[in-house]
Image: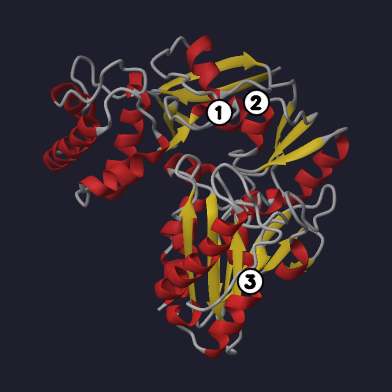
Amino acid sequence: MSTVKLTVNGRAVSVDVEDRTLLVHVLRENLNLTGTHVGCDTSQCGACVVHVDGRAVKSCTMLAGQAAGSNVTTIEGLAKGDELHPMQAAFRDNHGLQCGYCTPGMIMSAVDIVHRHGGNLDEETVRHELEGNICRCTGYHNIVKAVLDAAGRMKVAQAAE
Amino acid sequence: MYETNYHRASSVADAAATFAKGTESKFLAGGQTLLPVMKQRLAAPSDVIDLSRVQEMIGIEVSGDTVTIKAATPHYDVAQSDAVRKAIPALANLASMIGDPAVRYRGTIGGSLANNDPAADYPAAVLALGATVKTNKRSIAADDFFKGLFSTALEDGEIITAVSFPVPAKAGYAKFPNPASRFALTGVFVAKTKAGDVRAAATGASQSGVMRVPAIEGALKTNWSAAALDSVKIPSNGLLADIHGSADYRANLIKVMGQRAVTAAG
């Protein structure tokens, strides 16, 4: 057992867990942040993507101990109160989800994609960049539309700040 | 995952000392292979020693005709590095093709080489560029480093600290990714050294892991062009055959990826 201290969605937390515990299990089981999903458990589907120190990583492929001292943002940390993050709003407006299982990981990856590419996003880039996130419902079409829509909204929001 | 003890190393020396204390220790770099393997209970190290925060193992240095990538540098940082893009663009390009974005943020060059997956990308670059693998004990030439599937010249407890690449006159990498895993079904890296030598290495194709491709090297030495490989015959004996492709298919892919790599190199 080890004590792991980290910051999750701006809140300092401390958990006592076995060393083999994965970050995703700390989030879901110790912190009750069940928005982050476990889809495949084999590091392929991307349903568990969260941001660790600003980088979108698979939380099922990181030990809790590896994240000690880091800043973690989960899907629960994106909205500002009742106001959805522009990426969340774009997924809703563009019908970018059906069953919703992959959606938290899709959104966390998509926010990272927009951060990296800024306004230089096109459909091909979005499709390529989303290759680590698997969706079995939508056929990806509206997800790609949502990401492109959100990229525009995030640019406007950034310009306004 | 079976129980294990996690240690975060503070330095290369600390990592080596901690490794020696465990009964069956493993070094953990980005963890993008080791952790999935541990989750499947195919590996059960008593101790995992995390190298990813060892500051002396992170970073990229270019001096003169050498690009040195420290072992715990993630693929993303190599792909984005202006210095690498300028000195060896094919290497930055290769790094940008590994796995998916989340994997590239965590996976490291040292981890990839120590694991020596027969379909990994970095081994092709290291072998074709004639790089030198530096460890906490010695320097190992690429030609002496790779020893077949998942095996290397590394001794138990030896840590890769950096990889030094000589800047080539020209280099290119092309891979045919497995559509599901993004590992190379076959990838070929070609390089022309500043001395005029030509080296080519293929990954994903051989039963013995990454390999030089003498037929491609010979043809390109005479004529550095994709067309020079038109008549090259790659022998299929010793190549991998599985549901994704037969040995003959991979033999042809070596040629075609070689041609694309030369085209990319310019």
Residue B225, percent from left and from top: 45, 82
* Residue depicted at x 45% and y 58%: B79
- Visible in this render: residue B198? no
Q: Is residue A122 left or right of residue B113?
A: left
Quarter of the figure with the N terminus of chain B = top right
Q: Quadrant of residue B165?
A: bottom right
The CA distance from mark 3 to mark 1 is: 33 Å
Q: On the image, numbered disc 2 is attached to which residue?
A: B39
Chain letter of disc 2 in the image? B
In the displayed structure, would residue A69 be above or below residue B74?
above
Q: Which class describes the residues within 10 Å of circle 1: few (<14), some (14-19), or many (20+)?
A: some
Three-letter amino acid code of the residue under disc 1: Thr
* Residue depicted at x 62% and y 77%: B215
Query: Mark 3 and 2 residues: CB-CB less than 8 Å, in contact?
Result: no
Quarter of the figure with the C terminus of chain B = bottom left
In what element is the residue under mark 2?
A: helix
Q: Is residue A32 left or right of residue B221?
A: left
Chain letter of disc 1 in the image? A
- Between circles 3 and 1, the one closer to the viewer is 3
* Residue depicted at x 80% and y 29%: B46
Residue B97, percent from left and from top: 45, 53
Residue B176, percent from left and from top: 47, 55
Three-letter amino acid code of the residue under disc 3: Val
Q: On the image, numbered disc 3 is attached to which residue?
A: B213
